[in-house]
Image (cartoon, rainbow, N blue to C red):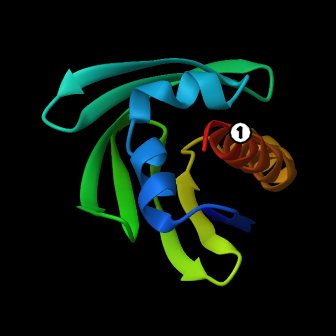
Amino acid sequence: MGTIEHSTILKAPPERVFALLERVEDFTDYSDLVHAVEPLGDNRYRWHVHVVGRDWTFDVAITERRAPELLAWESLAGVENHGCYRLTPVEEGTKVALTLTYTIHNRLLEKAVNKAARPLVGRVSRQILERVEARL
């Protein structure tokens, strides 16, 4: 199991940041690695991503939506993961903190993903938040 954390400050109030983050299907616009996000209904989505030279598909459900403070999810099928965005008002705008925990049930593949995941997810998280900020 791996856990990745990343945070940054966006120059906008939490309400505006949260409004963009909760539009899950728009994440294809926020990251080059997210190829598609299909709404499945009932706060569930199917993600199609390309990471570490492989295509991955996983279904997630939004487990908690507390505007403008918290957006949390967990996987239902595919890559086992759960995580959340926590938004905190700060003088400069909003501190956005991402926590992502994942499990891959193939030891060799998990080693490769663990080695690449921290810098990769950090880069993707930065890209997502930079693109969110550009829309604010």
Quadrant of the image for the N terminus?
A: bottom right
61 lies left or right of 7: left
Give, as a three-letter code, the residue at label 1: Ala
Position of 123 relative to 23 (above/below): below
Number of marks in the image? Answer: 1
Q: Residue at x 54, y 79 (%)?
A: 89
Secondary element type, mark 1: helix
- Provide the residue designation for mark 1: 134
Question: In which quadrant of the rendered view does residue 11 lie?
Answer: bottom right
Q: Residue at x 83, y 46 (%)?
A: 123
Comparing 4 with 111, the one in front is 4
Comparing 80 with 48, the one in front is 48
The percent coordinates of residue 105 (x first, y second) are 54, 44
Q: Residue at x 36, y 53 (%)?
A: 73
Q: Is residue 15 visible?
A: yes
Q: Is residue 49 visible?
A: no
The percent coordinates of residue 8 (x first, y second) are 74, 66
Question: In which quadrant of the rendered view does residue 90 lie?
Answer: bottom right
33 lies left or right of 22: right
Quadrant of the image for the C terminus?
A: top right
* Residue, far left: 42
* Residue, far bottom: 91
6 lies left or right of 118: left
Q: Residue at x 42, y 26 (%)?
A: 25
The percent coordinates of residue 66 (x first, y second) are 27, 66
